[in-house]
Image (spheres, grey):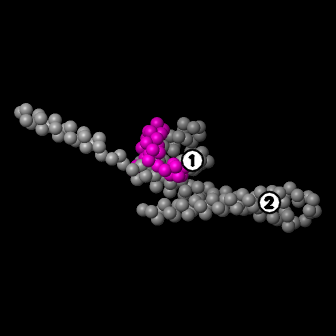
Amino acid sequence: MFRLFFLATFAATAALFFAACSPTPDPRTAPVSAATSDDFAAWKNAAYEKFSPDERNEFDYCINQIRLRISMNNEASGDAAIAQALCERVNGKTMREIMIMAYTSEGEWVAKELARQSDALARADAILDGPGSDDSKVNTRALRVALANIVSNLEKRQAKAQARLKELQDEK
């Protein structure tokens, strides 16, 4: 009887030892724990110890893109509600899945904004090419320069997001 008790105690101690010594999962591939905002903050704190500064920055950027999408789609309003909606979106997903979600969202938003700003640029060009004196078009010329800059920046952002999305999708 004593022998059985000793063996059971030894086995339980060994199991605890090996469980405690087993490596923690890599946060880059393990599912994110974000059932609540507190769970997500704890996961991020632990994960960020293993991430490089570039990985932290990109992950934060992606989380902000998802937050922005939630807010822009009026899915939630207020910090707490947006945080909960964010948690619902990312809980159980891997870092790669979250990044794909974020870059997909960014690509959709940038495409819409690029179309809107390109239309505004075309309207400014039509005014500049239309009737009227050069003096009456001073403000429109300034607007056109600003719009051309915005369109250029959006095109760069779109290309960057699409390239990163393709990288992530090709990783598998």
Q: Give the magenta range.
A: 30-59
Q: Nearer the viewer, residue 159 or 125?
A: 159
The mark nearer the N terminus, 1 or 2, is: 1
Q: What amino acid is at disc 2?
A: Arg
Q: Quadrant of residue 146?
A: bottom right
Residue 5 visible in the displayed image: yes
| Residues at marks 1 and 2, CA–CA distance in whole angstroms | 30 Å
Is 90 positioned to the left or the right of 156 in the image?
Answer: left
| Mark 2 lies on residue | 144
Q: Secondary structure at mark 2?
A: helix
* Residue drawn 47% across the image and 45% down it: 48
Report the predominant secondary structure element of the magenta stretch: helix
| Mark 1 lies on residue | 64
Residue 113 position (above or below residue 67): below
> Residue 86's spot in the image, x, y percent?
51, 44
Image quadrant in which the C terminus is located? bottom left
* Residue drawn 46% across the image and 55% down it: 96
> Residue 129's spot in the image, x, y percent?
85, 67
- Pick out the residue farthest to the left: 1
Q: Nearer the viewer, residue 65 or 1?
A: 1
Q: What amino acid is at disc 1?
A: Asn
Q: Secondary structure at mark 1?
A: helix
Image quadrant in which the N terminus is located? top left
Residue 82 position (above or below residue 146): above
> Residue 104's spot in the image, x, y percent?
54, 57
* Residue drawn 53% across the image and 52% down it: 54
* Residue drawn 68% across the image and 59% down it: 153
Is 24 a magenta residue? no
Q: Nearer the viewer, residue 115 or 34?
A: 34
**Counting other residues with Cα less than 10 Å from the Cα at mark 1, is it few (<14), some (14-19), or many (20 or more)?**
some
